[in-house]
Amino acid sequence: MQNNRSIRRLLSLALALMLLLTLSAAACAEGNPDAAVVETVTAEGFTMDYIRFGHGEKPLVILPGLSVQSVMGSADAVADAYQSMTDEYTVYLFDRRKELPESYSIFEMAQDTAEAMEILGLAQADLFGASQGGMIAMVIAAEHPELVHKLVLGSTAAQIEEEDFQTIENWIELAKAGDAEGLYLAFGEALYPPELFALYHDALIAAAETVTEEDLARFVVLAEGIRGFECSAELEKIQCPVLVIGSMTDQVLGAEASFRIAELLSGREDAELFMYGAYGHASYDIAPDYKDRLLDFYAPEAAA
C-alpha cells in the first residue's frame, strides 16, 4: 500500500514538472471557452503578455515565479492545471513586461502589472502570486488595494537578505556564463524534491537546449530584481484577506520566509498560514491539493 501511494505521488510530481517543460503553442480551440489564449496588453511605455482562459464571472490573476523561459509557451498546460477553477473564474496569468530595462525591481514589476490589470478592468480580482510572483502580489495588494479581493502568497518572502539570495546568485552566475544546462539543472534541483529532479534530469538537459541568449539575459535582469527586496512595512497596508502557503522543505527561500510573512500579518482574523511538510519550493506546482486550497480560500461556496 505504501509503495502504491509513493508511485501515485511520483506520477503527480512528474505531471507537475511537465507543466514547466511543456512548450505547446497557445491556441483557443473553437467552441471551448476554457481553452488558453495568449494576448498582449499595451500600456504607455511597455507591453505585457498574459494567458487568459476560463469562463467564470470573477477574475483570478496569477503571477508566476521566476523561470528560465517564459511560461507563455505553456499556456495550454497552465489552463489544464487550473481547470478546476474555470467555472468560477476567468483566469489571467501575467508575464513580466516585454521591454526590460537594465534593472527592474519588484516594485517596478508590481507597478507594471497593476497598470496592466487596470487597463483590462480587473478590479477586485482574486490574486495568487508564487515565489517572485508572490513578492509582486504583496506590493500590488498594498499599493493598489482596489485591485485585490483576496490574496494568496505561495513560497515567497517579504524580505531578502544577502544570505537569502545565495541560491539565486548562483543561478545568475550560471546565466551570465551562458551555461543554460547548468542553470536548468540548478534551478530544478532547488525547486523540486530529489525524486522528481532525478526522474526528469535528462528532460531538464533537453529543455536547456532550447534556451536562447535572450532568455538568459532576461533571466538575469528578472533575478537581480529580487536582490535586497524589502516590503515588510508595506504589509500593514494590505486590506484584503490573505492566505500564506509555504513548505518546510523550501530550498530557495526557506520555510522561515513564510513564517515571517504570517508573523507580520499576525493579529488579523483574515490572515491564515498553511505549511506543507514536503514538496519543496515548487509546492504550488506539485502538491496535489494546492488548487483545492486556492479555491476553498477564494470561493468556499464553490469549493463546497
Image: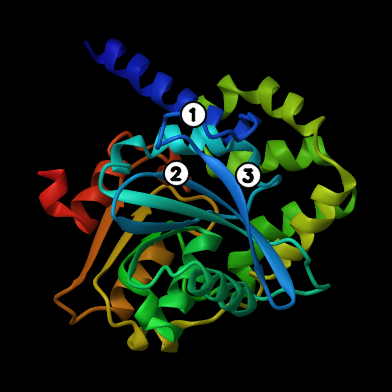
Measure the alpha-carbon separation of dots 2 and 3.
13 Å
Q: Position of residue 186 (x, y in %)?
A: 69, 41
Q: What residue do we see at 78% from left, 60% from top?
A: 220
Left or right: 159, with 49 as reference point? left
Q: Is mark 1 on a helix, strand or loop?
A: loop
Check whether the beta carbons of the residues at disc 2 and disc 3 lie within 8 A of each other: no
Residue under numbered circle 2? 53
Q: Tag 2: residue type?
A: Phe
Q: What residue do we see at 55% from left, 27% from top?
A: 18
* Disc with the residue nearer the chain's start (2 vs 3): 2
Q: Tag 3: residue type?
A: Met
Q: Tag 1: residue type?
A: Glu
Q: Position of residue 87 (x, y in %)?
A: 27, 42
Left or right: 114, with 95 as reference point? left
Residue under numbered circle 1? 30
Decide which of 249, 240 is in the foreground and name it.
240
Residue under numbered circle 3? 72
Point out the image quarter for the N terminus: top left
Q: What residue do we see at 51% from left, 76% from top?
A: 159
Q: Position of residue 59 (x, y in %)?
A: 36, 59
Decide which of 39, 63 is in the foreground and name it.
39
